[in-house]
Image (cartoon, rainbow, N blue to C red):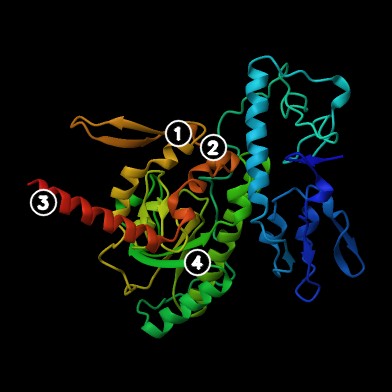
Amino acid sequence: MAWFAGYPREKIQWYPTIDPEKCVECGICMNCGAKVYKWTEDGPVVDQPYKCTVGCTTCATLCQGNAITFPDKKPLRELYQKERIWAKVKKELAEAGKFQVESNTNVTTGCCETSAPPNVENGGCGCGTAEPVESVENPPEEVEGCSCGCGGDYPDEYVKNNPDEPKTLADSDFIKKLEEYAHSIGIKSIGYTTVTPELIYPGQSPLFSNAIVLTMEMSDDLILTDPGTAAQTINDAHYEKLGKLTYQIADFLRENSFAAESAHPYGGVVNFSALGQKSGLGWIGQSGLLITPTSGPRQKISAIFTSIENLPVKDDNKHSWIAEYCKRCGKCIKACPENALIETETCCGGKETEFIEERCIGCSQGCTYCIEDCPFDQKEYADIKNRFDNMNTKLMERSKTKA
């Protein structure tokens, strides 16, 4: 029997539902590694629901017809916290040499599931008696480099060719139609800016300096899934989906006689976070991630370089206050399990945050702890801004009183 956070898997109501009215029979769900689906004469059906990995919604993310849905994920948060704590306890016991494993307790489970502690069914807590996720005697080999697809070459999967003589000016009505179309297919926010040399990675040369910046919000399944194979799969699916949306919007531009070049979110063409900040969508926090009013730090970013020379570029950025707020917060630094974010003292006695990229497992294992602990992911942007402003006002009043 498979268990999760001390509960029998069958008691956790987490499984997909297919809406036959929306299903286009694309067959993408049949790639499920847990073999949840079965193909019939009427198309795909949910054949083994309780084999579904708890919290995983990759099939729904990739579904071409948006026909797959899952239950509300909020009740899973407490279970994930229990599972995370239990995993840490097992690791500490293993390191201390106090984790004994019986040879007859091996149970094959899903990638996010664990074996049941032997005495759980009898009401005991099972401390130190469950099967470890990793063998103490045979630790896994360390993998050098990143196993994801970041920084790779992602050629534009366009359907429409760029026009021979592309238009360079767009009126406000077209910009409105462009934004409405982008929002309708899943884009969360849109910004506009010009691409300057410092934003372009070495060896890259976009066709145009006019950029449309796109964001897509990360789903709860990615944020709540602990780092590992399952989280990386969900993370990769997010990048793939935003990449496809970016290609669709680029084709929309071409259909309206504008030239376009897509920058896949996984590609190494430009610094997307910096591009997003320059476009006025938000501000880069201590974690190195773009923080926006609409999604906080939980978004993937892509861009389209276009022939449109009169994009509605904003000259100011009203989100610069985030930098000062982040200096006083530091929750993302404490949340990082790999110490990829460290505070260093400057020559003037101040502090600055250093991001050590080779330590970060956000890309290779789908880690989102810095996002999950960020106040901007837990509270409304406006509420945080109001409290920050009120605090600064009080500090100024106190300083005047002392003077």
Q: Real-space Cα distance between discs 2 and 1?
A: 9 Å
Give the mark toward the camera: 1 or 3: 3
Q: Where is mark 3, residue-wise?
A: 400
Q: Where is mark 4, residue-wise?
A: 188
Among all residues in the image, which is located at the extreme left? 403
Q: Where is mark 1, residue-wise?
A: 340
**SS of the residue under disc 1:** loop
Sort mark 1 into few (<14), some (14-19) or many (20+) by Cα contacts within 10 Å.
Answer: some
Question: Which residue corresponds to the image point at 84% horizontal and 49% vertical from the top-left?
Answer: 10
Classify 20 as above or below 17: below
Question: Which residue corresponds to the image point at 87% horizontal and 53% vertical from the top-left?
Answer: 48
Please tell me which of labels 4 and 2 falls first in the chain: 4
Please tell me which of labels 4 and 3 falls first in the chain: 4
Taking 31 as reference, is 267 left or right? left
**SS of the residue under disc 3:** helix
Q: Position of residue 266 (x, y in %)?
A: 53, 50
What label does residue 361 carry, if any? 2
Among all residues in the image, which is located at the extreme right? 41
Taking 372 as reference, is 175 left or right? left
Q: Real-space Cα distance between discs 3 and 2?
A: 46 Å
Quarter of the picture holding the N terminus:
top right
Q: Position of residue 80 (x, y in %)?
A: 65, 44
Question: Which residue corresponds to the image point at 92% horizontal and 68% vertical from the top-left?
Answer: 41
Q: Real-space Cα distance between discs 4 and 3?
A: 43 Å
User: Please, what is the three-letter code of the amino acid marked with disc 1?
Assistant: Ala
Q: Real-space Cα distance between discs 4 and 1?
A: 28 Å
Classify 177 as above or below 326: below
Q: Real-space Cα distance between discs 1 and 3?
A: 40 Å
